[in-house]
Amino acid sequence: MILAKVVGTVVATRKDERLVGAKLLLVQPMEPGGAPRGGHLVAVDTVDAGAGETVLVVGGSSARMAGELKETPVDAAIVGIVDSVEVTSGRG
Amino acid sequence: MQLARVIGAVVSTMKDRGLHGRKLLVLQPLAPAGSAAGRALVAVDAAGAGAGETVFFVRGREASFPFLPERVPTDASVVGIVDPRPPDAGAST
């Protein structure tokens, strides 16, 4: 999984029917130290995350194990709101 | 799988039900010689690993397998801890 910051929401009226009702958030992946890393992602929110929060994002087919997403066409899901990140040694 | 060093931990109270009670570790992937090789990531611990240890982790769908039949939504899991190297043969005692 990666850490990311919630930077916005995505509203899409026209979409695959399996995505109807899914909350879509725009997230910026980040290094454990907090610096942005890589391009933005659209992720399905399953834990009621809000703007500005640091979240845990799972990718790939494992994203469909989050919440009730079994047959939903998603490859990124927010599975946790991060309280804190502790980096004790090495690069972060 | 890939080698990595455990460099930290993530605390998350509000999370998917499948992650409750699971240890979330920050990993730095390593080259065999021990230097950093790739971006840090967060993985669920399935091997009892701790900070500073060298481990190997699995990515993708298979990362959820150690926890079956429980459904744990993870795309990276620590599945082994690398044994510390024994002292070189011939070292003086």
Image (cartoon, coloured by chain):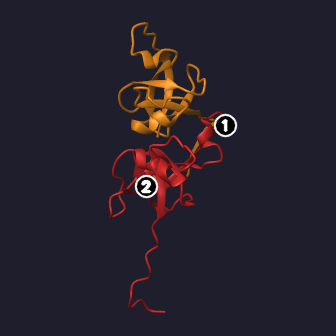
Chain colours: A orange, B red
Task: Please name the residue shown 65% across and 33% down the image.
Answer: B14
B12 lies left or right of A58: right
Report which quarter residue B41 is drawn in.
Answer: top left
| SS of the residue under disc 1 | loop
Residue A19 pos. (x, y %): 45, 18
Residue A12 pos. (x, y %): 43, 10
Judging by the rendered image, the residue that carries numbered circle 2 is B57
Q: Could you classify mark 1 by the number of other residues whose Cα lies within 10 Å: few (under 14), some (14-19), or many (20 or more)?
A: some
Q: Nearer the viewer, residue A32 or A41?
A: A41
Task: Please name the residue shown 50% across and 55% down the image.
Answer: B6
Q: Amino acid at mark 2?
A: Phe
Q: Is residue B87 visible?
A: yes
- Residue lying farthest top? A13
Q: State whether residue A29 is above or below residue B84.
A: above
| SS of the residue under disc 2 | strand
Disc 1 and disc 2: Cα gap in Å?
23 Å
Judging by the rendered image, the residue that carries numbered circle 1 is B13
**Quadrant location of the N terminus of chain B?**
bottom left
Residue A45 pos. (x, y %): 53, 25
Q: Could you classify mark 2 by the number of other residues whose Cα lies within 10 Å: few (under 14), some (14-19), or many (20 or more)?
A: many
Q: Are marks 1 and 2 on the same chain?
A: yes
